[in-house]
Amino acid sequence: MPNAESIHWSAGMPPHLITFCQCVSQATCSGKVEVAEKRPSGHMSAPDLFPYPAARRGQEEFLRDAREALAQGSILVAQAPTGLGKTAVALASALECALEHGKKVLFTTSRRSQHVMAIETLRQIRELTELTVVDMIARESMCDDHSHHPVRHRGSRIRAVSQVLLQGIFHVQEVVELSRRFGVCAYTTGLRAAKQCDVLVCDYNYLFSQYRETILKALGFGLPDCIMIVDEAHNLPSRARAALSGRMSGDVLLSLADACGGEFAGLLRSISGLLRAEAKVVGGESKVPSSFLARLLRRYASSRPFPTESSLADALEQSSANLTSSLRHQADETLLVLREWQESNRLRLLSPSESGSLALLALDPRPATAPVFREVHGGMLMSGTLHPGQMYVDILGIPQERVALKSYPSNFPPENRLLAASQRVSSSYRGRPDCYRLFAREIYDLCFVIPGNFAAFFPSYEMARRVGEILHRLEPPKALLWERRGQSKAEKEGLLRVLKRSGRDPGCLLMAIQGASLSEGMDYPGNLLSGVVVAGLALNPPDLRVEALRAFYAKMFGRRRAYEYAYLYPALNKLVQCAGRCIRSPDDVAAVVVLDNRLLRTFYKSRLPAGFDPVAPTDLAGAVRSFFYARQDEKYIADQARGGGRPEPHRVDGSESGGEAESPKGLPTLQP
C-alpha cells in the first residue's frame, strides 16, 4: 500500500480539508482511526439546540409547534414564508426529539442549494452538542470510476474515509472531492458513514422512490427509526410521481441489445423496430391502452409463444447485471415500464419521436409517499408555498390522524412590500389580438417607476417571447435578460452577476418563466430585485397529462377539488413563489405587481394564502411610483420629477419603422 507521502491530497485545499486528509492517510497506513465515542441511544434529556440567541417573530411559534408535533409523533405540515428561518427550526426541533428517543434525522430536499443551507445550520448546532452528519445526493452524481486503484486497497480506504467523515461536517461536494483523492467511491463511503450518523442530508429519492427499501437496508435502519424533514415540500408530489414513472425508447432498446448480446439482443432489436414503426403512424403524442405492449410483443412472436411484459422484464434483468452505470439507469427505467405497465392510475403515452418511445406516467404519488408517512417516528413538511396544506395531505396520503396543519405569517415589515393587481389585463385574454400588446405596455410603464432591476415572470416561454418582441420595439430603458430552456447552472449564475453589476440605474428587466428555475431555484439576495411582475396566472394547459391527473383527482377527491388540485392551486402557488423572489430580508423594499385581474374575483381571491391580498389601483404605475417615492432617496425623487426618463410614447401596433421585431435570441441583452 502506498504511504501517506505518495498521496498528493493537499494541493489547493483549505486547512480543514488538509486536516481531514492527514487523518485519512494516517488511518489508512495504521489500519485504525480515532472516532468520537458513540452517544448511547435512547431517552436522553434533549438540550435546546436552536442555534441563535433568540427566535424571530413568527419563528418562535413555528419552533414551539414543531417541538410539540414531533413529541407527539405527528407530521407537521407547515406553510412558512421566506425569511422565517425554516431550516434552523426544523433541524433544531428534530434533533432535540432524535436525541431524546434515540432516532436519526433525515433532512430531504430537492435542491442542491438547500443542502448547503442545512450543512451550514448543522455546523452551528454542533457548537451546542456532539453531532455526526453525512451529506449525500443521487448515486450517479457521487460515483466515480476508481478502476485505476488496486481493489485490495479500497476496503481499508473506504473504512478510513468514512470514519474520518464523521469527525467533521462536510458538504457533499467536499465528500466527493476527498473520496476521489483517495480513490474510493463517495457514494459507498457516504453510505458506510451514514450508518453511524445522527443526521443524513439527502435527496427525496432516498425515501420517496422504489429504491427506498434498498437504501434503508444499506443504511441499517428503518422508517420507525427516523424523524423526517421534507424541505420545499410543494415539490414532493411531482418528484414522487416522477420516481414512479419511466420511459422505454427504441434507441435505449438498441443500446441494451448491444450491451447484452446473445439471443436476447435479437428480441430487443425486433421490439425496437416495431416501436419505431408504431411511432411513425401517430400524428402526435397519443394515449395508448394497457393492451398496447402485449399487442406489440404478439406481433414480434407471430406464430410462436410471445413474451409477456413480465417475462421480458425478467430476461432483461438477468442480461443487464453488468451494465455500466449510465446504461444501468436506462435499463432500470425500461424495467419499471415493463413491470408496472398493467398497474392502475397510470397514463400510457406513445411519442412520435424518430426512435419511438413509450412513457408510463404515474398519476398517484402515494405508493412512494404514504408508507413513509405511516411508518416514520415523526416528521414535518415545510415550504413557503404549501397551500392549502390539506391538498398535500390528500395527494401524498398522509394519515389524517397524524397531521398537524399550520400556517405562519411573514416576519418582514408589511410596509416594505406593495402588492398590487392590474384591473386591465389577464392572461385569459391570450386569444385576443391585443393581449400581448397590453402586457407589454404595462411592463413598459413599470420600467420607469421601479428603480433598478426587476423580473417579469410569464406563464410560458412563448408568451415571454411574444411580449418581449413588442417590448423590444418600445425600447425600454432597462436591458432585457432572458431565461431560456436548458440553461446551464453557469449561465443562470451569469445572469445573477449581470443583475449585480447593473446596479439601480437603470437596472435590468429579467424575462423569466413561472415554475422554472429562476422563479424557484434561484435566490436574489441584497434587494437585487426591486420588483416582480407576475404576467398572468400560469394555469396548466389542458393537455393529456394534466387532464389525466384531473380525472384521477376527480375519482379520488371529487370534481371541485380535482379542478383546484390540478389547475388552480398549482398556478396560485407559482404566483406566490414568484412574488417571494424580491423580498428576502426584513430590510428589502419591493413592489409585486400581478398582471391578471382574475385575482380580484372572489373565486380566486378566496383561495389565496392569508396575507396575500393585492390592492387594485386604477393607475398601476402611479401606485408603484408613490410606493417607491415614499421610500427612496433624493435621486429617485428627482428622476420621477423629470418623468422618469420617459421618451415620447411609442406606437405598439407593429407599424413602427424597422419592420418586424427580432426574436428574443436577437434582442439586446447584457451578457453575463
Image (cartoon, rainbow, N blue to C red):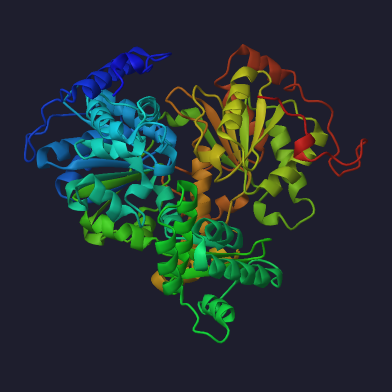
Outermost residue, bottom side: 303
State which quadrant residue 175 falls in.
top left
Locate residue 332, reporting x and y percent. Answer: 44, 57
* Residue 411 shows in the view: no
Seen in the picture, residue 15 relative to 183 is either above or below; the reply is above
State which quadrant residue 230 falls in.
top left
Seen in the picture, residue 483 relative to 255 is either above or below; the reply is above
Question: Is 202 positioned to the left or the right of 552 in the image?
Answer: left
* Residue 36 shows in the view: yes
Look at the image and tell me in which quarter the C terminus lies. top right
The residue sitting at 78% across, 33% down in the picture is: 667
Locate residue 164, reporting x and y percent. Answer: 24, 25
Front residue of 161/284: it is 161
Front residue of 474/247: it is 247
Front residue of 75/483: it is 483
Q: How many marks?
A: 0
Question: Is 53 positioned to the left or the right of 564 in the image?
Answer: left
Look at the image and tell me in which quarter the N terminus lies. top left
Front residue of 170/12: it is 12
Locate residue 442, reporting x and y percent. Answer: 70, 39
State which quadrant residue 126 falls in.
top left
Seen in the picture, residue 661 relative to 596 is either above or below; the reply is above
